[in-house]
Image: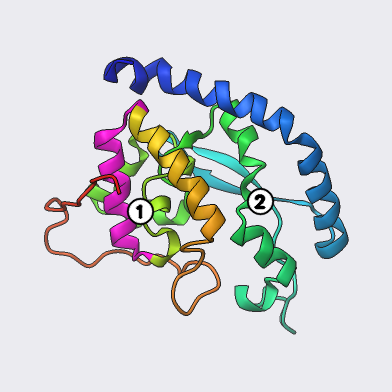
Amino acid sequence: MSWRFYRGPGKRIFDLALAIPTLIVLSPALGLIALLVRFNLGTPVLFRQQRPGLHGRPFILFKFRTMTDARDARGNLLPDAQRLTPFGRFLRSTSLDELPELWNVIKGDMSLIGPRPLRIEYLPLYTPHQARRHEVRPGITGWAQVNGRNALSWEKRFDLDVWYVDHLSFSLDLNIILRTIRAIIRREGISAEGHVTMYRFTGTQTSDSSNHTVSGGMM
């Protein structure tokens, strides 16, 4: 498959060819997870949040809910560590909470493989180099996810995302899918050190944001 074709319609065809049958096959499991979320965490079952997609255009991301809505006396949400239940932790560690994103893939908001869609408020914080991660559709999994996931620093994750943008290919996407399966089985890189998920990105302090390099050799 040619590089030009895959970066255009080829990748979208690949996404639909995998996402549609996967969603159909997993629909009973999705229904069961939804019932378990309802029983353990209440409603809503789905977590919905606006995220930036291709070229930074916003879309609504769908995931299974993993946290409670517990709040303090002032009505503010408690820290993630206090709202993440053992059941929610299980969903995250197995990546089962990500399954509703298959619908985002089918809709065209996301790809199966690509940089993870992060918070909208991060957009003005990116350096020009980091902002290049939005040159492709965000993905359910990606190059950063199979090279450390949340155990990486933000800067390393963004460098890996941009490396993926520059080296996107059919063979690389297949490699990432296989390595994603291995990472899920091993439950690798689920959280940053000292955090239950990933700490908030507050911007990169650098004098030269254009001189970033990253090794992208497949392991």
Nearer-the-camera pick, 173 or 213: 173
- Amino acid type at circle 1 is Pro
Helix, strand or loop under label 2: helix
Location of residue 146 in the rendering, given as x and y in whole percent from the top left corner: 41, 51
Stretch of the chain drawn in magenta: 152-170
Q: Which of marks 1 and 2 is in front?
A: 2
Q: Against 214, is 138 above or below?
A: above
Please say if 47 is above or below 200.
above
Confirm whether residue 62 shows in the render: yes
Vertical order, 43 against 167 (above or below): below
Residue tagged 2: 96
Task: Report if residue 195 lies within the magenta region.
Answer: no
Of the numbered discs 1 and 2, the one sitting upstream in the chain is 2
Q: Which mark is residue 157?
A: none
Magenta region, main secondary structure: helix
Identified by mark 2, the residue type is Leu
On-image quarter of the N terminus: top left
> Which residue is labeled 1 in the image?
124
Q: Residues within 10 Å of mark 1 (few under 14, many from 20)?
A: few
Percent from the top left, x then y, of residue 169? 32, 28
Between 209 and 33, which is closer to the camera in this rendering? 33
Q: Is residue 167 above or below residue 92?
A: above
